[in-house]
Amino acid sequence: MYEMLENGDNIWVAPDDEITPHIEVKFVRDEFDRASLANSIQARIGEATIPISPLELQIAYKLHLGTQKDVEDAVHLYALFEKSLSAPQLETWVTRLDVESEYERLKRS
C-alpha cells in the first residue's frame, strides 16, 4: 500500500461490494491537500469521528476537477450544507482554484 501511495496512486476505502460512501487516502501533494489537513473538520460516522477536508474546499475543488460526477458532488454538498457553509471561505477557495463562473452556475442551480 505504501508503494502505491508513494507512486502517486490514491487508495479508496469503502464497504464491501459498494463504492459509496468511500474514503480516499493519499499523500499530500499540493497546497490544497495541505489546507485540507490543516483546516480539517470532524465527520461523525456512527460513534466514531474522522477528520475530513472543509466542505468549502471540497466544493470548490470538485468544481475545479470539472467532471460531471465532481460537479454533481459539488452541487449535492452545496445544497445539503448551504446554510452552514462559510461563504467567505468558499469564495476564497473558488478564487484560488479559478472556478468563479462554475461557482456562479452552482449558486443558481
Image: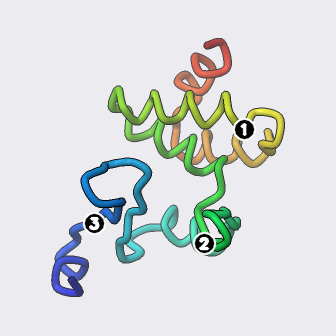
First in sequence: mark 2 or mark 3?
Answer: 3
Residue at point 72%, 38% (across, down)? 81
Q: Position of residue 21 (x, y in %)?
A: 44, 51
Q: Amino acid at mark 2?
A: Ile
Residue at point 35%, 72% (across, down)? 26
Residue identifier under label 3: 10
User: Nearer the viewer's eye, disc 2 or disc 3?
Assistant: 2
Q: CA distance from mark 2 to mark 1?
A: 18 Å
Residue 81, which numbered label? 1
First in sequence: mark 2 or mark 1?
Answer: 2
Residue 50, which numbered label? 2
Q: Are marks 1 and 3 in contact (CB under 8 Å)?
A: no
Quarter occupied by residue 79: top right
Q: Tell me the SS state at disc 2.
A: strand
Q: Around disc 1, counting alpha carbons within 10 Å, would you say few (fewer than 14), some (14 to 19), or many (20 or more)? A: few
First in sequence: mark 1 or mark 3?
Answer: 3
Foreground pick, 57 / 101: 57
Q: Amino acid at mark 1?
A: Phe
Q: Are marks 2 and 1 in contact (CB under 8 Å)?
A: no
